[in-house]
Image (cartoon, grey):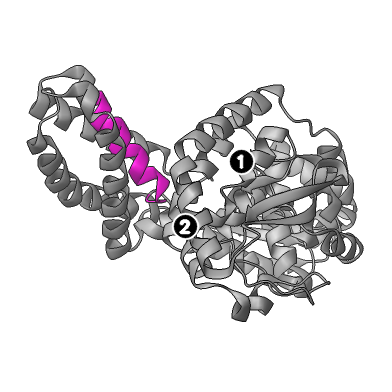
Amino acid sequence: MKINSNFLKLIDYIILLTYNLYITQNVLISLLFSTFIYLGIYAFRTYDFENIESLNDTLIRVFAGMMLGFLVILSFYAFFDGYILKQYFLDNFLFTILVLPIVHKISYYILIKHIEPKKYIVIGRKNEWEELMNEIEKKSLGKLKFVEYINPSPVKLKKLIKEHDGVLVADPELEQLVIDEINEFKEKGIKVEYLPVIVERFLRRIPIQVATKFKAHYEVAFSEIKESPAKRIVDIFISLIALIVLSPVFLLISIAIFIENGMPIIFRQKRIGKDEKEFVLVKFRSMYNNKKTTSEKFADKEKDRIMKSGKIIRPIRLDEIPQFINILKGHMSFVGPRPEQPGFVKQFNELIPFYEFRHKVKPGLTGWAQINYKYPTTLEETKVKTSYDLYYVKNRTTLLDLKIIMQTIEAIFWKKGI
């Protein structure tokens, strides 16, 4: 069973398009309004089921997404002067804010409340996997239940399967003890799931514990990773446009930093990129000069050094603007794991299994981990964040990149990630 919201996205778009055709009587204007309002709503994760569950959360996200869509539409206003009426904005606002949250709540009720939970036997040890299984149950909104943990014997497994909906293999070694029974279940149409598939589907990350347990599977998967040449073309285009459009912001921030604390304006630091090659990352300096600082530190350890201008530009990521130069040079990509300092990389390579696979792709200005997890301040938090990076490296597609770019806006708005 795979719970997703694709049907809800389609319904929303059809509703928006139908309504705009009704009020504008113009196909092009209708497509413009419907598409950008929909994309704005999507960017604020309105379609994640954990957000749909709360009506208040849905209202806030629909409102924020709608405002984002309106801003984009206004950028086209000059081209459609006389065709886009001010009344269209008010009509869409009232319609969208009143109708879509109700549609979402009804859809949530139909999809979630009326789907019977699936009960699984876990081939694995309870003390090893219970915490992770609880997380999966929560992410599936209770529609997956892991009710038995066994170190299997063929007799016990055949007896228990009659009372359950499927089997989840959480240990390749234990699987071999009952491989004949598992093959028999597959032939009979009984659901047999594997932990790597389940965690990636519901958690959208690859926990280090799972990668280690299914080491052979993931080593093969990561060995086949290659970056698309098309991504480099997109990076060049985006970085050129961004540097041109943001040049006034670049100038204003430079003046603010100079007035507050003098030179230098740009902060330079060695980071590790693709294939663990060093490069110099650039960003606006947001902290007071401190020549005594020589070792790598987590950012939360230096909060007392943040300048007044830094307190403004850091939360909304304006200090990262100069990294479009890194992207243009080819050191970075627009989307990818965030580049770390050499000392941290050396340390994490030793302490975190599979950490080195983050460097199979270019580091990014934004990334899957950045929009899904907070800034890590401990080793355990770094392991969690790495699990999101590993998911991105293994599952990267153009569509995933577009999703990350859009939802970066939501991450900034809700002050998530870094």
Compared to residue 144, the image places residue 391 above or below, namely: above
The image quadrant of residue 333 is top right
Amino acid found under the numbered disc labelled 2: Ile
Q: Main secondary structure of the magenta part?
A: helix
- Within-10-Å neighbours for mark 2: few <14, some 14–19, many 20+: some
Whether residue 40 is in magenta: the answer is yes
Q: Position of residue 233 (x, y in %)?
A: 64, 23
Instruction: Give the mark, 1 or 2, whose residue is nearer the N terminus.
Output: 1
Is residue 200 or residue 322 the one in the foreground? 322
Is residue 98 or residue 271 the one in the foreground? 271
Q: Which residue is mark 2?
A: 412
Tag 1 secondary structure = helix
Of tags 1 and 2, which is closer to the observer? 1
Compared to residue 372, the image places residue 134 above or below, namely: below
| Label disc, if present, on residue 324 of the rendered structure | 1
Where does the magenta region start and end?
31-46
Q: Position of residue 56 (x, y in %)?
A: 27, 64
Residue drawn at point x = 51 percent, y = 65 percent: 259
Tag 2 secondary structure = helix
Residue drawn at point x = 29 percent, y = 51 percent: 62
Q: Is residue 353 left or right of residue 29?
A: right
Residue drawn at point x = 28 percent, y = 41 percent: 71
Whether residue 237 is in magenta: the answer is no
Residue drawn at point x = 31 percent, y = 35 percent: 36
Q: Position of residue 31 (x, y in %)?
A: 26, 24
